[in-house]
Image (cartoon, rainbow, N blue to C red):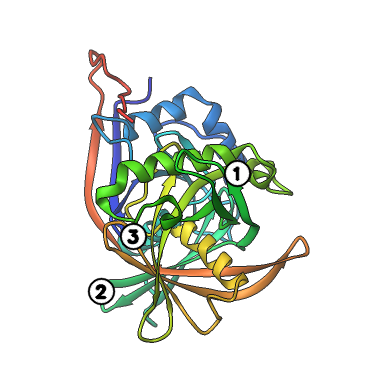
Amino acid sequence: MVQSDVRTIDYHTGGEPFRIVVEPPVPILGATVAERRMFATADPAVDGLRRMLCFEPRGHADMYGGFLTPPDDDGAALGVLFWHKDGFSTACGHGTMALGVWAVESGLVAADPSGVTEVTIDVPSGRVTARVHTAGDRVSAVDFVNVASWPVAERVTVPTTRGEVLADIAYGGATYAHVAAKALGLTVAPGNIDQLIAVGREIKWTLDGSAHARLAGDDRLSGVYGTILYDDLGTDPDGNPHQRNVAIFADGQVDRSPCGSGTASRVAVLSATGRLPDDRHLVHDSIVGTRFRARVGRHVTVGGRPAVIPIVTGTAHKTGEHQFVVDPADELFPGFVLR
């Protein structure tokens, strides 16, 4: 049984929720954030806290959040374990963006007088940066400077109930399969959400056990995290590629934002194919109409393969503060989900 008094601070990034637990009321052991994630997945108390805050009636099937932890060393301001209804993820761009804004707005990290404040965060996939832009005493935007990202495989044939499709697979802190929605007879629109969830799940689970899902060097990061279903909208008036997407991640969860780590993996794909030159931005819209802008920060090499450091820009806003309690007589604890 987790403790019955749990306080959270909630944000949304481009419409996607992020529930911050500053002081988790249960111990999360490990020397690094990556080790703490492995502990959390196996510990009933930590996982029970996740379910309590994510499941109905306190959350919902698409809820997302994070437990703050100490960083791996003094080089970062904080560490975080990201969670959703199915467990603990290796990366979360929208969560990183929300945490950066929270760190500045809460005073954990003092705002730089220049108007740009870097908040360094240790996540299971590595060390990332939220670059928070301020105008006066208000946050105007936030950049997610991700870990190295790269294409894993191109044009992989995937069977689905809507026919065979070709998927590009890429890593952006987590591994995603990228599929054009029109190849499935769909568009990325709210009215198609049930069909998008169903086929996104199919593609993820078909590829999750394949060789493409293995991340060389750290098997803790292996697995296909989600499916990016996208509409290609051509270019904007400035010649930037413009796309709309929905990320179906974990087991059928829907990202309301354009997806931070998913956008990073999209940058890796488009850069490798020449669709995203270094002097252009990806204009990336979500299924609810919110927008990230993303670009290649720099080119790097990882394990002998070319990779990029993506920079994803958006906004995050506080939505509330909560004190969650558990009635000892509540038969529904820790909660339930309907999907």
Q: CA distance from mark 3 to mark 2?
A: 28 Å
Q: Is residue 313 above or below residue 216?
A: below
Foreground mark, 3 or 2, reads 3
Foreground mark, 2 or 1, reads 1
Relative placement, left or right, of 101 versus 298 is: left
- The amino acid beneath tag 2 is Asp
Question: Mark 2: few, some, or many residues within 10 Å (few <14, many ≥20)?
Answer: few
Dot 2 falls on a residue whose secondary structure is loop
List x then y, in percent, for residue 59.
27, 36
Camera-side residue: 282 or 216?
Answer: 282
Q: Which residue is mark 1?
A: 34
Q: CA distance from mark 2 to mark 1?
A: 34 Å
Q: In the rendering, which numbered label is found on residue 137?
A: 2
Return the disc, 3 or 2, that comes first in the chain's sequence: 2
Return the disc, 1 or 3, that comes first in the chain's sequence: 1
Q: Is residue 60 above or below residue 334?
A: below
- The amino acid beneath tag 1 is Ala
Q: In the rendering, which numbered label is found on residue 286?
A: 3
List x then y, in percent, for residue 315.
32, 66
Camera-side residue: 91 or 114?
Answer: 91
Residue at 55%, 80% in the rendered image: 277
Foreground mark, 1 or 3, reads 3
